[in-house]
Amino acid sequence: MAIVVVSGNASGFAQEIEAGRHRIAADEPAAAGGTDTGPSPYDLLLGALGACTSMTVAMYARRKQWPLERVSVRLQHAKIHAEDCAECETKEGRLDRIEREISLTGPLTAEQRGRLLEIANRCPVHRTLTSEIDIRTRLV
């Protein structure tokens, strides 16, 4: 299991994320009281979903030897009123909505494109976000 360490000065929002040998900055925009030195936590979450989607779709196309040339995933997060979501189980309060648009470049058939859309919904991060999550927190 990989270990990710996030740390920052308690006087602001800026954080440093250490994932193995990689360093990533996170922050809030200036309009939200941050210093905008990196993407917001929700931007990072969308980035994780988009990267996983693109990787999964491309891997599947390579395995099938389909003529996929490029994958682009555009994501947006919003809080919506539950009553505005007919297909959602939650009917009161607010819930999170992620809009994901996938662009596939290459001479793919309609059937191949449809299958790649199905595969996009099977990426591991998508599955994690749509499943029950058990987060255990303790002070050390």
Image (cartoon, rainbow, N blue to C red):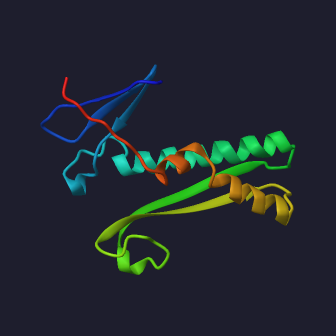
- Between residue 124 and residue 29, name the one nearer to us: 124
Quarter of the figure with residue 38 = top left
Q: Could you say where residue 139 lies in the image, as x and y percent from the top left? A: 19, 28
- Between residue 49 and residue 76, name the one nearer to us: 49
Residue 94 is at least partly visible in this image: yes
Residue furthest toward the left?
11
Question: Would residue 32 appear left or right of 77 to someone viewing this image?
Answer: left
Q: Residue at x 74, y 55 (%)?
A: 116
In this view, 99 is above or below 140: below
Q: Residue at x 44, y 76 (%)?
A: 85
In this view, 62 is above or below 78: above
Q: Quadrant of the C terminus?
A: top left
Q: Could you say where residue 41 lies in the image, as x and y percent from the top left? A: 35, 46
Residue 40 is at least partly visible in this image: no
Question: Would residue 50 appear left or right of 33 to someone viewing this image?
Answer: right
Question: Would residue 112 appear left or right of 52 to someone viewing this image?
Answer: right
Q: Residue at x 43, y 47 (%)?
A: 45
Q: Residue at x 47, y 24 (%)?
A: 1
- Between residue 66 and residue 33, name the one nearer to us: 66
Quarter of the figure with residue 112 = bottom right
Residue furthest toward the top?
21
Q: Could you say where residue 63 lies in the image, as x and y percent from the top left? A: 82, 39
Q: Could you say where residue 22 lies in the image, as x and y percent from the top left? A: 45, 25
